[in-house]
Image: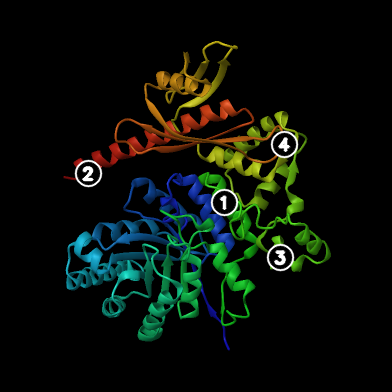
Amino acid sequence: MEKEQIIIFDTTLRDGEQSPGASMNTKEKIQIATQLERLGVDVIEAGFAAASKGDFEAINQIAQVVKNSTVCSLARALERDITEAAKAIEVAPKKRIHTFIATSPIHMEYKLKMTPEQVIKKAVEAVALAKSFVDDVEFSCEDAGRSEISFLKEISDAVIEAGAKTINLPDTVGIRLPDEIANMVSQMHQYIGDRAIISVHNHNDLGLAVANSLAAISSGARQVECTINGLGERAGNAALEEIVMALKVREDIFSNVYTNINTKEIYPASRMIATITGIEPQPNKAIVGKNAFAHESGIHQDGMLKNRKTYEIFSPEEIGLNKEDTLVLGKHSGRAAFIDKLKKLGFELSEDELNSVFERFKELADRKKDIYDDDIRALITSNMTSIDKSYELVALQLMDSTGGVPSAAVTIKTPDGKEITDAGIGDGTIDAIFKTIDRITKQHGKLMDYKVKSVSKGKDALANVTVQVAFGENEPALIGHGLSVDTMLASARAYIGALNSYLTMQGMLKKRYEDSQSSI
């Protein structure tokens, strides 16, 4: 029997970015997109072009870089969304527009305030417009998990006639069980036949996203939408690595299907995304968690020593995790060795970016004896979070004598190139640093969350500090990341990073407002 391909549709850059704190800048998104291409992802949903100028630019730049994977933009069933999506992906060798509208009774009545007939009309118009720009159009029935089968069939008929090649059936609120998903997909597969590919997009609110995706594949779905590390809003999405490895390890059950995924790129992709977003998979996360191949029980260890297959159903090397190749570089390592390591880790840098990261590597090597893969990843991603024309930390000096008042002296380079030094006190050292930064920049941040973790191991390990800061009333909290062997220095960098993101966002909002006024 000839095997059928399961199309892997990765939405880490769109749905994954909707995880609280997972926002990424354009440089970071391009690195992730190129890694997803190396991974063998068939479709990369690069973002939502109409959402913001930043999203549009990121999608457009990804479309210029990615050659083998299809680059996709999400679009609501609105003319502006679809035309923006088409512009953003226009230069991509392979491109797709993914448009959607809600189809469940509760969404149609309360969110859309539209009749089923009006929804079908809107969906057909959207697909027809998308089809005028690209040949590859996907249509999603938002909240398909709570939609009526009869209506799913009716609207699918209409959009397929209008040109949709893929019909996506999302369990948007993650409410369905595997047998329910299997029943819905089976009925739709039998009804649609070979007129379109059936896709699923499962959320993990009940912890069933991967199980539901596998049930859908068994019932005829030939595309699954997923994210690296299961990133996504609320409880996340189906994890790409879990779906792919389940299909591979249980080939006895899924003998009629295959994917184009290069599984040796799974772990590099997982680590890259965890480092960029600052969201680490939980230690016991399947496939990529740091304990996934840890064996503490004496019985397990005894079995592993005799034969690894006694307790490992696949080897770490199958997902690109080589435990023997983590200690990599030191202060005497040269540029050639550094460039070689970057390639192995999946990063592609311009000459200027390479020079900047190599300089920071040499600085780190003077302070840290052993440098690990995760240290290199952190250096690169920290460098990518820098924003042009932003505030930059120049120097930090702390004074906290026993029984005294914590104080900090901070020197910052402003966006126009001036250096300003000021000092201040606080309820603690961190508070003193942040208040002084506020005074220099004339901003006022409210610290919402603060986390510090070791990047690798050893007493001289790099500290990676993540802060969540709100600037101004009713403003969203923004994430900042800071990296240094010195935790206080990392904290200052993280706070300034959050401030720069805020000011960049404000600039984009101002530009969008000015553009909208000039077009009236």
Residue 458, disc = 4
Residue 516, disc = 2
Q: Are marks 2 and 1 in contact (CB under 8 Å)?
A: no
- Which element type, helix, strand or loop, lies under badge 4? loop
Above or below, 203 against 59 in this view is below
| Kind of residue indicated by mark 4 | Gly
Above or below, 149 against 113 in this view is below
The outermost residue toward the right is: 306
| Kind of residue indicated by mark 1 | Gln
Answer with mark 1 or mark 4, whichever residue precedes in sequence.
Answer: 1
Q: Is residue 160 visible?
A: yes
Closer mark to the observer between disc 2 and disc 4: 4
| Kind of residue indicated by mark 3 | Glu
Which residue position is annotated with label 1? 282
Disc 1 versus disc 4: distance between alpha carbons?
21 Å
Answer with mark 2 or mark 1, whichever residue precedes in sequence.
Answer: 1
Q: Are marks 1 and 4 in contact (CB under 8 Å)?
A: no
Disc 4 versus disc 3: distance between alpha carbons?
28 Å
Closer mark to the observer between disc 1 and disc 4: 1
Disc 3 versus disc 2: distance between alpha carbons?
58 Å
